[in-house]
Amino acid sequence: MSQTLKAVRGTRDLLPPETALWNRIEATARAVFARYNFGEIRTPIFEDTLLFARGVGEETDIVSKEMYTWEDRARAASEKPQSLTLRPENTAGVVRAYIEHKLGETGQLQKLYYIGPQFRRERPQKGRYRQFWQIGAEAIGPQSAGSESPLRDAEVLEMLSSLLNELGISGWTLELNSVGSSADRARYNDALRAALEPVASQLCADCQRRAVTNPLRVLDCKVPEDQAIIETLPKIAEYLDEDSKKHFDAVIAALDAAGVPYHLNPRLVRGLDYYTRTTFEFTHGGLGAQNALLGGGRYDGLSEAIGGPKAPGIGFAIGLDRLVLTLQGLETTETIAEKINAYIAPLGETVNPAALKLARELRRAGLSVELGDGSFRLKKSFEAADKVARKIVILGEDEVQSGILTVKDFSTGAQTKVPRAELDRFLQQ
Ligand code: AMP
């Protein structure tokens, strides 16, 4: 017996009616981004592995453990095969494209958004998949275009708060921090390492390892027993230089002026190496353990890290799967599929061609129509129609001849004779 094939662990099919919700979210995001002058970019789903090694950071969990990487076939025997990777995130790809197409030479700030699947070999659970979707945006450009301004950070955060509100997601929290410049971070890392040395043996096994390899990651630890010690560790705010402090204060002043609420979280360091200064997450209580709806931050050195010109930027990625979960958890969300305008029931196979013609005309007039089949008994047509449509249109030889159709409205139970010329308007009601 042949084995039944299933979607691979950590991947899933999205089916109607749920896909209608996905589309509504994507359409809202596109509309909001357009109002803020962001244009869409679509980058390839796989890239040279080096891009992520340099762009995301070799020390990160994503690059060291979670990537889907393979060797492509060499084009010639003399050539080394190229290592390729399914993108685990989209910022590195966007910045590569920015460099490749010399977008910096326009002298303009580039405001780009993307919507697409990303791939990470994580342990699957609710809200965490191996193929997941992100909606993200980046504002990047030469310094002369104002790309380093704290106003850009605040504008991006204000845009996100508006987008979540417009989607009907209430109860989100903006967690905000600054991780400073790379020099600030290096000094903070040294301080953390020193502070961890005497207490590390009391922490979980992961933290004992992190305390040596990457002390910043200790701040991400979720083990309850470790929290009391972690709270006593030095805070990054104490290690910011004057410029980083000024930048962060300006972001906060602009958010206050715009009335965007936030919560300062000195432990928010995020899992990607490229962040500088502002980092943030929007969380939602309805999500459980995987409570981050989205994350992002400033990455002033990323372009240079992957061989490009200086191009400061700020961006974010929203977990689309998690937006859907959150909206499904909120009672206000319409989860019942919208019914279509009409179901056409041909009486007998000889009427099928006329039924197709009628369906074509109604659909061209903008109505949503399902087409039955003349081989169905009328009872079966009624049952099928009641499930998907608001009204059923009965089409027999008589109706074709007379041009007068019988229409039944499922919500009222009323049966009406409607002349063909009035049918479009009648079905629209
Ligand atoms: P990151 O690219 O790690 O900054 O993640 C940004 C956002 O993407 C997170 O806040 C999540 O909402 C979402 N996300 C990240 N990894 C996954 C995953 N494996 N499954 C579903 N959503 C994810």
Image (tube, grey):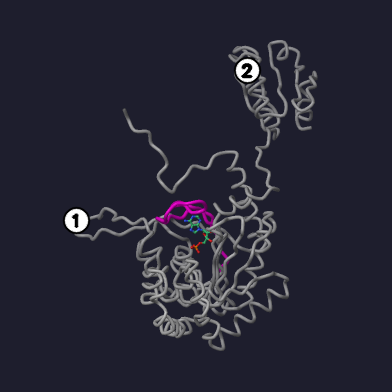
Could you say which quadrant of the image residue 322 lies in? bottom right
Q: Position of residue 365 (x, y in %)?
A: 71, 33
Residue 275 highlighted magenta (yes or no): no
Circle nearer the viewer, 1 or 2:
2
Please give left or right for residue 186 compared with residue 258 in the image: left
Vertical position of residue 112 compared to residue 239: above or below: above
Q: What residue sits right under mark 2 in the picture? A: 380
Residue plotted at (42% across, 58% down):
87
Residue type at numbered disc 2: Lys
Vertical position of residue 210 compared to residue 330: above or below: below
Please give left or right for residue 292 compared with residue 310 in the image: right
Q: CA distance from mark 1 to mark 2?
A: 64 Å
Q: Which residues are magenta?
A: 110-134
Q: Which mark is residue 77?
A: 1
Q: Is residue 113 visible?
A: no
Please give left or right for residue 59 compared with residue 116 in the image: left
View extreme (bottom): residue: 242
Could you say which quadrant of the image residue 109 lies in? bottom right
Residue 125 highlighted magenta (yes or no): yes
Q: Residues within 10 Å of mark 2 (few under 14, many from 20)?
A: few
Q: Dividing the image into 4 quarters, which one contains the C terminus?
A: top right
Q: Secondary structure at mark 2?
A: helix
- Of residues 9 and 50, the one nearer the viewer is 9
Residue type at numbered disc 1: Ala
First of labels 1, 2 by sequence position: 1
Q: Residues within 10 Å of mark 1 (few under 14, many from 20)?
A: few
Q: Position of residue 386 (x, y in %)?
A: 68, 25
Please give left or right for residue 358 compared with residue 233 in the image: right
